Image (spheres, rainbow, N blue to C red):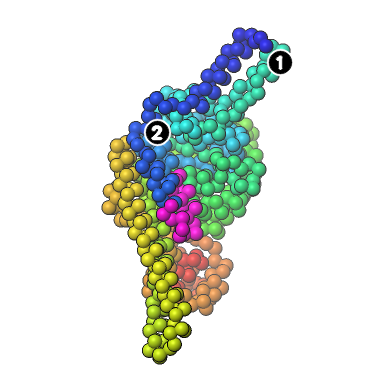
Amino acid sequence: MNFDEEVYEKLLANHELLCNIIRQNTSEPQMKVDLSRIGKMIHKKIPDTLKKNAPEDFYELYTDFKSEYEKFRDFILYDKLIGKNVVALGGGFSSGKSSFLNALMGKRVLPADIDPSTSVPTYIVNGDKHEVLGINVFDTKVTMQPRDIRKIAHGFGEVENDDDEKVTDAVTLGHVLENIFFSTPLHQYQQIAFLDTPGYSKPDSEKYSAKTDEQIARGQLNSSNYILWFIQADAGTITEEDIKFIKTLREDIPKLIIVNKADKKNLADLQAIIHKIKSDLDLKGIRYVDVFAFTSKLEQIDDVNLNAYIRADRENIHKQLLNWNQQVYESNFARNFKVLFARCKAFYEDKIEEESRQLNRLNTSITRLMAEDIDADILEPLQLMVHEAQKNVNELKAIYQTLKELQNEFFTEIKFIADQVGIAMPEPSEIDLLQDKVQDPLQLIESYKKKHGLRTDPNTVRMLQDLFADIEPQIQKYAGGSAYQQILQNIIRETCSIAPKDIHINDVFKTSDIYAELIQNA
C-alpha cells in the first residue's frame, strides 16, 4: 500500500511517540538514590511479618502505606514536587476534575471525558516553560510534549488517506504510564502541586479499572496535603457512595467541596443543592472547608443572577487556593508512614494483653483446683490450654518485637534516602514522638475508659440519645473553641432544663462516660 507524504509523516510521528512511551532504559539509572532496600521492606518484609496476625483493616493500612511510598518516590523522580503542597482532586469518575484544572489554567491542556482505564495520575506544577515527563511501567522517564497527554488518553494513531479510508486504528496508552508530571507557566500557584487522580469506582462498576480502584484512589488522596472533592450538580446532592468514601479519608486533610457543572441548574436549585450537601456532610460528621459552585462554561450562562453567584464562588475557590498556596510546606511523609506501624503495634499490644489475661485466668484456675486435690486427668486439658496460651503470647511478643525492629530499619533507610534528595524526615528515634495532627476525642476517651476499667451505663446512653435526638448538629458550624463550648453549654442546659447557676459545664465533663456520649451525640 502506498501512502502520500502527509500520511507517512503522521504514521512516523505516531511510531516515534509509541516507541518513546514504551521504551525501557537500562543504560542509565533513573533514580538519584537506591530504593531497592526500602522496596524490599515494603513489598516483602512488612507483609511477611504481619501476614499471620494482622488488624482487620491491615489491607487498607497497607494500601495507604504503599501509596505514601509511591508519592515519596514521585518526589524523588520529579524533584520539582519537593517543597510543594499537594492538592489532590478527588471524586467519582467524570466529575469534572480535569476540566476544572483546564479552566484554572485558561487552556485545555488535560484530557477530559476519557475512559477510566486510559487515565493517568497527573501532577501539575508551576514552571517557566511547558515540560511534560512521564514514568512508564518500566520506571523509565519519558519526555513528551503537552499535546501528547491528550493523545495518550484519548487515543492516537488513527490515520486516514486521501480516500478517507482508515489506514490505522487509534491506540490508547494510558495503561503503559504510571504518572505524568506537567510543568507549565499557566499554573499560577507556585507552591501548589495539583494531583489529578483518575477518580474512584468499585469493582462492580462498569467504569472500574485497576487505576480507579477505590483503595488506590483513597491512598492517593490520603497522601496529599489538601483535597478538592468534586460533585456533579446533576446528582442533586452528594451521593451515599461519596460520603462513605470520604469518611475513609484522613480527617486531618482539609477538604473543599466543589459542585461542578453548576451551569446546568438554575440559581434556586443550585443553592438548594449546596445547602443539602452541607446538611448531609454535617449530619454524617464530615469536616470540610466549604462547598462552592463551579463551571468551566461561565461565559455561556445568560442568567445574570446565576452567573454572578457562580462567579463569586469561583473567586472563593481562588482565594482558598491562594491561602493553601501561602501555607508553609510541612512534610507529612513520616507521619503518614507511621500510621501502619502505630496501628499494628497497638493491635499486638491489645492481643498480648488479651492472651495474657487468658493465661492468668487459666493459671489461677489450675492453682485453685490443685489446692482442692483435683485428679490430674481433669487438670491435663487446662494445662494444655495454658501451654497453648503461653505459646500464643510468645509468638505475639516475637512479632511485636520484629515489628519494632522493622519500624526502626524502615525509618533509618527512609531518612538516609530523604537526606540525599532534600526531603525533610525526622530521626528514627523521634518517630514514636510524632503525634497525629488531629486525634479523635472518642478514641482518646475509649482508650482512657479501657485503661481504667470504666464502662458506659447503657441507661445513660439511652437517656442522652432521647434528650438530644432532635438537636441539630453544631460541630461543623462552630468548630471547637470557647464559642462552641458556650453553645454546647446552652444546648445542654436548655434541653435538660438546668439553670445556669445550678451546674457548670465542667462538672458534666468530669464524668468521662457522659462526656463521651455528649460528643458522640453532638
Question: What is the x, y in percent for residue 457?
Answer: 48, 77
Task: Kindly identify the residue that appears in the image at 29 percent across and 42 percent down.
Answer: 416
Q: Name the one closer to the observer, 165 or 282.
A: 165
Left or right placement of residue 179 versus residue 280 in this view? left
**In the image, residue 76 lies in the stretch drawn in magenta:** no
Q: Can residue 106 be seen in this view?
A: yes
Residue 460 position (above or below residue 68): below
Which of the marked residues, 1 or 2, is nearer the chain's N terminus?
2
**Location of mark 2 (residue):** 77
- Magenta segment's dominant SS is helix
Q: Which mark is residue 135?
A: none
**Discs 1, 2 touching: Cβ within 8 Å:** no
Q: Residues within 10 Å of mark 2 (few under 14, many from 20)?
A: many
**Location of mark 1 (residue):** 164
What's under tag 1, amino acid-wise?
A: Asp
**In the image, residue 62 lies in the stretch drawn in magenta:** yes
Task: Kindly identify the residue that appears in the image at 53 percent across and 57 percent down.
Answer: 282
Q: What element carries label 2?
A: helix
Q: Is mark 1 on a helix, strand or loop?
A: loop
Look at the image and give the residue range highlighted in magenta. Answer: 48-68
What's under tag 2, amino acid-wise?
A: Leu
Left or right placement of residue 51 versus residue 98 in this view? left
Q: Name the one closer to the observer, 48 or 289.
A: 48
Q: Is residue 489 visible?
A: no
Q: Name the one closer to the observer, 405 or 149.
A: 405
Question: What is the x, y in percent for residue 279?
Answer: 57, 55
Q: Quadrant of residue 348?
A: bottom left
Left or right placement of residue 162 versus residue 147 in this view? right
On-image quarter of the N terminus: top right
Residue 62 position (above or below residue 144): below
Question: What is the x, y in percent for residue 109?
Answer: 53, 28
Task: Kindly identify the residue that appears in the image at 34 percent across and 35 percent down.
Answer: 33
